[in-house]
Amino acid sequence: MSPVRSFDAPRARRAPTSVSGRTLGGESVTHELHGPTLVVAVKSSCDGCRDFVHSDLEELGDVTVLIVSPTDDLLGEWEGAAQPVTVAPDALDALGVRWPPFYVLIDPEEQRVVVEGVVFGPAQVAAEIAPYLPR
C-alpha cells in the first residue's frame, strides 16, 4: 500500500524565476528563485499555516522556503513570526495556487512546478517534497 499524500500529480505548468510582493510592513520585496524553492501559500486562521510562519523550519533542511499570502495578516496571527511573510497575490496566481494552505516546489532551472499539495505542517511537507529534492 502506498503512503497517503496530500497531492496528486502536479498540474504541468511553468514557474516564475522571481516572486515580487511586499512585506507585512508594506515594503516592496523581490525574491529571485535560485535552486529548489518551496513556496508555501498561507492564510489567517490556519493551524498548518501558523506552524510554517512561527517555526524554524529545520525539517526542510537546505531547501529555500518562501512564505506567501494573498492578503495581509488581518487577525494579527503572524506578529513576531519566525519566518517572513510576503504578500503577493499575483505570484500565487502565476504559480496556479488557487487557495491557501497550499505549497508548490519549484525547480527554477527548468522553470516548472515539480510537486504541489495541501499544507498540514512543516514535517508533512518536508516528507512529501523529499523525493523531489536533489541528493
Image: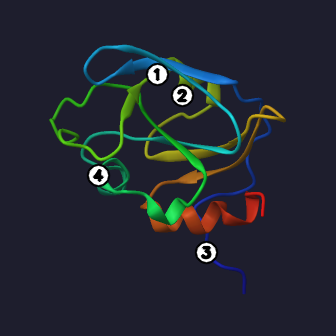
Tell me how far mark 2 sits from mark 4, CA to CA: 21 Å
**Labels 2 and 3 touching (C-beta < 8 A):** no
In the rendered image of this protein, does residue 53 appear above or below residue 94?
Answer: below
**Labels 1 and 4 touching (C-beta < 8 A):** no
State the mark number for residue 4: 3
**Label 1 amino acid?**
Pro
Q: Where residue 98 sits in the image (x, y, percent)?
A: 53, 34
Q: Which marked residue is nearer to the observer: mark 3 or mark 4?
A: 4
Question: Which color scheme is applied?
Answer: rainbow
**Labels 2 and 1 touching (C-beta < 8 A):** yes
> Which of the two discs, 1 and 4, labels the residue nearer the N terminus?
4
State the mark number for residue 92: 2
Q: Where residue 60 sits in the image (x, y, percent)?
A: 53, 60
Tell me how far mark 1 sits from mark 4, CA to CA: 21 Å
Instruction: Count neighbours of disc 4 (C-alpha within 10 A) and say few if under 14, some if 14 to 19, many if 20 or more.
Output: some
In the rendered image of this protein, does residue 94 appear above or below residue 11?
Answer: above
Q: Which marked residue is nearer to the observer: mark 1 or mark 4?
A: 4
Q: Nearer the viewer, residue 134 or 15?
A: 134
Residue at the spot of label 4: 54
Tell me how far mark 2 sits from mark 1, CA to CA: 5 Å
- At horizontal 72% and vertical 81% (from top left) the residue drawn is 2
> Which of the two discs, 2 and 3, labels the residue nearer the N terminus?
3
**Label 4 amino acid?**
His
